[in-house]
């Protein structure tokens, strides 16, 4: 379990030298994520043992993390809340895009191991071989989930362009405040064919669309071995799921993280291209 600790306020920064095949929006998302991970590693260290210590070097008291081998799940803490808006600087040096980001937030140290959750976003297929974070306009999306312990699950989709957060799970017609999860059971969400006939009318199925060349979204998967209750949302236009503003979501999520010592959050970035 990841037990609650007091929070620490930090200012994180990161400079990202962007590969040629990455867009500015993708680069901003990556730079922000790496800034958060770097801040947690600097403050609390990593979960990687000495056998892998070459992944992290130390210079002038700061951890230099090799992000090809380390991510949010490998640091000994978690990002609780972003304070204010991240500040970006976009530059080009010798034809290479460089993104600088600075962000303030609250972090917390973990005092126990995380639950080994299986979370897989699937594209146009319901088997694990269809796992992908790269979608095309009109692609269907499914979610595979499994936990070694029983609990409750919430799933949200963050649309950074619209500044909206959509509640994907529990389903819109579901009475539960959160999706019940049985230990060891494999779940396939957003697929009516994967449940019993009498349950199919409750299942929401999702097709991802965009009217832009590329859109960056993020799936936020929230699990707790205790109780969970979804955030307050409002009806959306058309067939879109119920939604709330990003600001409302971030405030609610920060409060949940502080109050619930059993909560675990997995963020999955995904792109939708035309």
Image (spheres, helix red, strand yellow):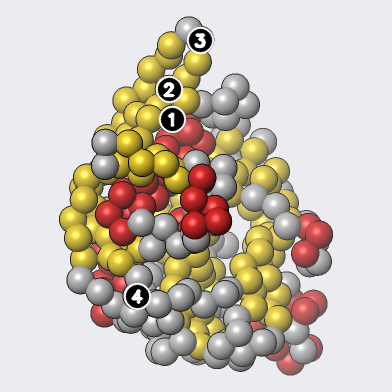
Question: What x and y, as percent, mark residue 211?
Answer: 58, 38
Quarter of the image holding residue 202?
A: bottom right
Q: Secondary structure at mark 4?
A: loop
In whole angstroms, how far apart are the C-alphas of marks 2 and 1? 6 Å
Locate residue 125 relative to residue 215 in the image: left or right.
Answer: right
Residue at the spot x=34%, y=75% of the render? 111
Looking at the rendered structure, which numbered label has been put on residue 16?
A: 1
Locate residue 259 relative to residue 136 in the image: left or right.
Answer: left
Looking at the rendered structure, which numbered label has been put on residue 98?
A: 2
Q: Quadrant of the N terminus?
A: bottom left
In whole angstroms, how far apart are the C-alphas of marks 3 and 2? 9 Å
Quarter of the image holding residue 260?
A: bottom left
Looking at the rendered structure, which numbered label has been put on residue 95?
A: 3
Outermost residue to the front: 50
Question: What x and y, as percent, mark residue 57?
Answer: 42, 41
Front of the two marks 1 and 4: 4
Q: Is residue 197 visible?
A: yes
Q: Secondary structure at mark 3?
A: loop
Q: Residues within 10 Å of mark 4 (few under 14, many from 20)?
A: few
Quarter of the image holding residue 56?
A: top left
In whole angstroms, how far apart are the C-alphas of marks 1 and 4? 30 Å
Residue at the spot x=39%, y=50% of the render? 37
Looking at the rendered structure, which numbered label has been put on residue 242?
A: none
Q: Secondary structure at mark 2?
A: strand
Compared to 31, does 83 lie above or below?
A: below
Kindly check if marks 1 and 3 are in contact, taking CB atoms under 8 A apart as contact.
no
Labels 1 and 4: the sequence-earlier one: 1
Kindly check if marks 4 and 3 are in contact, taking CB atoms under 8 A apart as contact.
no
Kindly check if marks 2 and 1 are in contact, taking CB atoms under 8 A apart as contact.
yes
């Amino acid at each position: 379990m990841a037990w609650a600790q007091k929070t620490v306020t930090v200012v994180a920064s990161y400079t990202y030298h962007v590969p040629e095949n990455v867009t500015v929006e993708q680069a901003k998302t990556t730079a922000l994520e790496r800034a958060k991970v770097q801040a947690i590693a600097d403050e609390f260290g990593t979960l990687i043992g000495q056998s892998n210590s070459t992944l992290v070097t130390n210079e002038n008291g700061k951890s230099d993390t090799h992000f090809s081998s380390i991510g949010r799940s490998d640091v000994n803490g978690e990002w609780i809340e972003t304070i204010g808006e991240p500040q970006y600087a976009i530059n080009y040096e010798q034809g290479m895009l460089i993104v600088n980001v600075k962000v303030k937030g609250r972090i917390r140290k973990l005092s126990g191991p995380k639950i080994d959750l299986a979370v897989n976003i699937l594209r146009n297929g319901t088997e694990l071989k269809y796992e992908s974070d790269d979608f095309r306009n009109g692609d269907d999306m499914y979610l595979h989930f499994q936990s070694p312990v029983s609990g409750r699950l919430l799933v949200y989709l963050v649309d950074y362009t619209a500044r909206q957060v959509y509640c994907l799970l529990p389903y819109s017609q579901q009475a539960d405040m959160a999706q019940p999860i049985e230990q060891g059971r494999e779940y396939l969400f957003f697929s009516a064919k994967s449940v019993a006939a009498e349950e199919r009318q409750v299942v929401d199925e999702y097709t991802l669309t965009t009217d832009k060349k590329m859109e960056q979204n993020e799936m936020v998967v929230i699990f707790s071995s205790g109780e969970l209750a979804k955030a307050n949302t409002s009806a959306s236009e058309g067939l879109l799921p119920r939604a709330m503003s990003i600001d409302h979501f971030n405030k609610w999520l920060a409060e949940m993280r502080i109050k619930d010592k059993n909560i675990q959050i997995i963020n999955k970035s995904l792109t939708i291209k035309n």
